[in-house]
Image: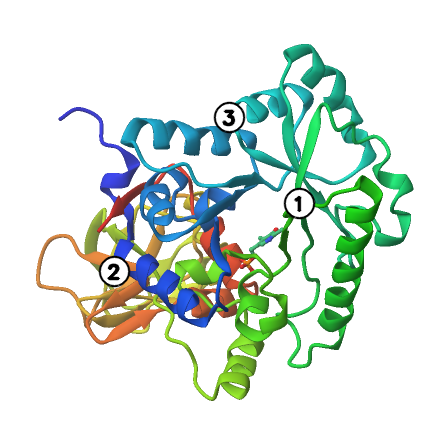
């Protein structure tokens, strides 16, 4: 048996059926001919890249990543399992050596700025041609070419080294609002930008156009274009409450997304503390009566936010158990007085369902003063992920 993996005390369960269900929800909503792309950045939004890749690869038509090595891992997975080759696009920063490797692997790379002219000598030296997609900054103020700098901003793109296969952009302000005037302006700028890119590069063939992430795919049918890039909602989470409200107003119903992630932990020990005992650093909690506590071998190191101190509850045997005092680096103490069997270990659900109760990523985000995206992506990469 030997030394235990941290995943044997605290682990994540990835529900592959939930992921497939969420992909179906989007397929039913997409216009004819619009392809479904899945975003696996941020360790697949904390769900685990390696564990999420097989079900996501099966459910999606295309994959979007941040890092070159993840794209190469997709190609290795396809070779190993004889899966079809999906279109893969690296959205994030790559260097010249990576550009060469990605060209060899048939992976597309986002072209975001003229600094990438450094790819050209490396690509020529290797004798490969890179598939590049022009990222337009239509109002996010992040990476990408400003549409009105085209054609001059694209002059470095040498056709012998780079084949331009698509144009993309990203919305700035859909999740935080219930009216979409800024998004409409971005969409208009995108359409004009695509026209300019075609003209500047003399492109007449098909060009893949994409701008919609989860919220836009749900709320702005005109933004679906050729492919959508679904991140958070592929994992069964809503981009925001505003998005859910807007979806209800627009569609007359709320599509059912199923969260794919549960986080569970076996207690290190349980014990009784006498009335008046303190719990945790700072002595911020004092037991009003004799209480039974469970010590969970998990803390902010594992991605359970310290802001959950004295605020969150976890589930044990389908019952809510408050977090007592401070969340520590490797320990969290919960009150199991009403929930535990007489002896032994308890299994706590930190995120997900247990019986009739549920702790959602949205609820954790409210307690921790952040958004569900951050809650799930910060769950430690060292924890074991199990696909169920
Ligand atoms: C993160 C990201 C997405 C996915 O966004 P969600 O809101 O998670 O669906 C799509 N495109 C780009 C460029 C992104 O950075």
* Secondary structure of residue under mark 1: loop
Q: Residue furthest front?
A: 204
Q: Nearer the viewer, residue 208 or 70?
A: 208
Label 2 CA crowd tier, 10 Å (few <14, some 14–19, many 20+): many
Say how the picture is coloured: rainbow
Residue 303 appears left or right of 355:
right
In the picture of the structure, the residue carrying the numbered disc 2 is: 293
Where is residue 196 shown, x and y percent of the image? Answer: 82, 51
CA distance for labels 3 and 2: 53 Å
In the visual, does 320 lie left or right of 123? left
Q: Earlier in the sequence, mark 1 or mark 2?
A: 1
Mark 2 lies on a secondary structure that is strand
Q: Give the mark nearer the N terminus: 1 vs 3.
A: 3
Single out the mark in the foreground, 1 or 2. 1
| Nearer the observer, 66 or 363 | 66
Rounded to the nearest angstrom, the CA distance separating label 1 from label 3 is 22 Å
Tell whether circle 1 marks a residue whose Cβ is less than 8 angstroms from ligand 1. no
Say whether residue 6 is visible.
yes
The residue under label 3 is 105
Q: Which residue lies most toward the left here?
A: 342
Residue at which label 1 appears: 205
Q: Is residue 295 left or right of residue 249?
A: left
The answer to which image quadrant residue 283 occupies is bottom left
Q: Nearer the viewer, mark 1 or mark 3?
A: 1
- Indicate the position of residue 87 as horizontal and vertical percent values: 49, 41
Q: Residue at x 21, y 69 (%)?
A: 337
Q: Position of residue 311 (x, y in %)?
A: 44, 68
Location of residue 344 in the rendering, given as x and y in whole percent from the top left corner? 11, 53
């Amino acid at each position: 048996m030997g030394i235990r993996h941290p995943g044997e005390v605290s682990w994540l369960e990835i529900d592959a059926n939930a992921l497939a269900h969420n992909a179906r929800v989007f397929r039913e909503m997409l216009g004819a001919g619009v392809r479904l792309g899945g975003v696996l950045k941020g360790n697949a939004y904390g769900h685990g890249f390696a564990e999420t890749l097989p079900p996501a690869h099966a459910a999606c038509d295309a994959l979007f990543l941040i890092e070159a090595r993840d794209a190469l891992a997709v190609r290795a997975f396809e070779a190993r399992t004889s899966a079809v080759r999906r279109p893969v696009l690296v959205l994030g920063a790559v260097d010249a050596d990576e550009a060469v490797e990605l060209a060899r692997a048939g992976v597309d790379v986002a072209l975001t700025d003229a600094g990438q002219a450094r790819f050209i000598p490396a690509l020529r030296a290797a004798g490969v041609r890179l598939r590049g997609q022009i990222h337009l900054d239509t109002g996010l103020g992040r990476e990408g070419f400003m549409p009105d700098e085209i054609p001059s901003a694209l002059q470095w793109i040498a056709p012998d080294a780079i084949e331009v296969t698509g144009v993309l952009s990203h919305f700035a302000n859909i999740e935080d609002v219930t009216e979409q005037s800024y998004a409409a302006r971005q969409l208009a700028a995108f359409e004009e930008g695509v026209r300019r890119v075609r003209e500047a590069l003399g492109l007449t063939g098909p060009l893949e156009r994409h701008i919609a992430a989860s919220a836009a795919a749900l709320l702005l049918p005109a933004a679906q274009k050729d492919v959508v890039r679904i991140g958070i909602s592929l994992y069964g989470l809503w981009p925001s409450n505003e998005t859910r409200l807007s979806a209800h107003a627009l569609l007359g119903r709320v599509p059912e997304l199923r969260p794919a992630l549960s986080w569970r932990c076996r207690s290190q020990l349980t014990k009784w503390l006498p009335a008046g005992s303190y719990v945790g650093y700072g002595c911020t909690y004092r037991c009003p009566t004799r209480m039974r506590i469970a010590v969970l071998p998990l803390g902010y190191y594992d991605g359970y936010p310290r802001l959950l101190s004295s605020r969150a509850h976890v589930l044990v045997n389908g019952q809510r158990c408050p977090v007592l005092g401070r969340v520590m680096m490797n320990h969290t103490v919960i009150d199991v007085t009403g929930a535990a069997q007489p002896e032994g270990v308890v299994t706590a659900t930190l995120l997900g369902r247990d019986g009739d109760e549920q702790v959602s990523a949205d609820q954790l985000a409210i307690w921790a003063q952040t958004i569900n995206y951050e809650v799930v992506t910060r769950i430690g990469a060292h924890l074991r992920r199990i696909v169920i």
